[in-house]
Amino acid sequence: MKNQLFALLAAAMALGFTTTVYSETVVSLQPTTDITTVSIGEQVTIDIKITGGKGVVGYGPLVVFDSGALKYIGTTPGDYLPTGGTWMSPRLNDDGSYELILTVADITTSGKSVQFPGAEFTPEPAQQISIDSMLFEIPALPPESGLPKAPYWAFSFVASSPLDADTKPVPVDGDGTLATLTFEVIEAKSAAITLLEISLSDTDDAPLESTLQNSLITINAADAAGKSAADANGDGKVNILDLVFVASKFGEPVTDPVKAADVNDDGEINILDLVLIAQHFGN
């Protein structure tokens, strides 16, 4: 699992965006709070779900989010893997800084860097992991990402099952929750969160195939007065009039008089703005 995690992080640092092959094992994002209209200061939680898993002993996702609208708070393990294994993830401190938290069995350590243990079933040595390798800013996204223009950050985390009597991690089949992500809304705009990649491993630390579905979600943040970003014309509703308003400004430069038509706040008035309105239609 450790080898796969480091390979995943290396790919992220190189901004390599991979395509997950089709598999009966499906991993997806599922909001557990209402994301259709969320006010500044509110928190949203999103589960990473797995269905049809077979022989899974560990995982290492890569999540990308709009840091201009969302603040990453932390990640908690789900119910899929048995307790007592390994868990490592970034978390936000009370002073606004970030650190890594590492739990191995019943021992927890934290700090700007932690010593990730070598796997007991392989000769791998322990390795020092820093917060900067698990939570980092992305300078620019490639066009094929399909995400609107925004400042983006990425983070990863890792989990593995406890070892059995034969010093092999316990494999798990079926459905469940891998982890729960928590964010705080810090700006009134439509903000994207995407599960860019997922690395699943078996008892031999070999990769397992999986398919990503519903891996991109959009949070529709409102300002203090409750105005939704998707309510482009400001009448308190998201309906056909908002589509008409944005369509009438389609392709125009984003100046103050038409700024509301740039629903996703990416500096352009285009099809992505119409899509976001359609996603929140009727709210």
Image (cartoon, rainbow, N blue to C red):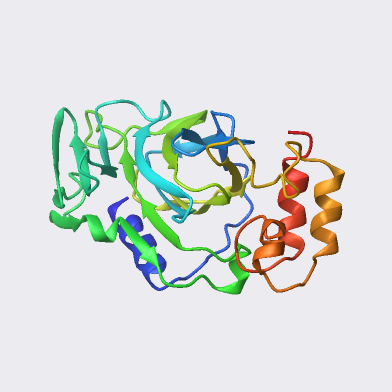
Give how far across and how far down residue 6 sits, in percent.
31, 60
**266 on left or right of 61:** right
Residue 103 drawn above or below residue 112: above
Task: Answer with the quarter of the image where residue 29 lies.
Answer: top right
At horizontal 75% and vertical 53% (from top left) the residue drawn is 275
Name the foreground residue: 11 vs 24. 11
At horizontal 42% and vertical 35% (from top left) the residue drawn is 179
Give how far across and how far down residue 150 sits, in percent.
52, 63
Does the rendering let one see residue 9? Answer: yes
Which quadrant: the C terminus?
top right
Residue 256 drawn above or below residue 221: below
**30 on left or right of 78:** right
Name the foreground residue: 25 vs 30. 30
Report the number of numbered marks. 0
Give how far across and how far down residue 277 sits, in percent.
74, 48
Does the rendering let one see residue 200? Answer: no
At horizontal 72% and vertical 63% (from top left) the residue drawn is 258
Furthest-front residue in this view: 257
**211 on left or right of 17:** right
Name the foreground residue: 64 vs 128. 64
Give how far across and how far down residue 153 sits, in percent.
41, 59
Residue 21 drawn above or below residue 28: below
At horizontal 47% and vertical 72% (from top left) the residue drawn is 140
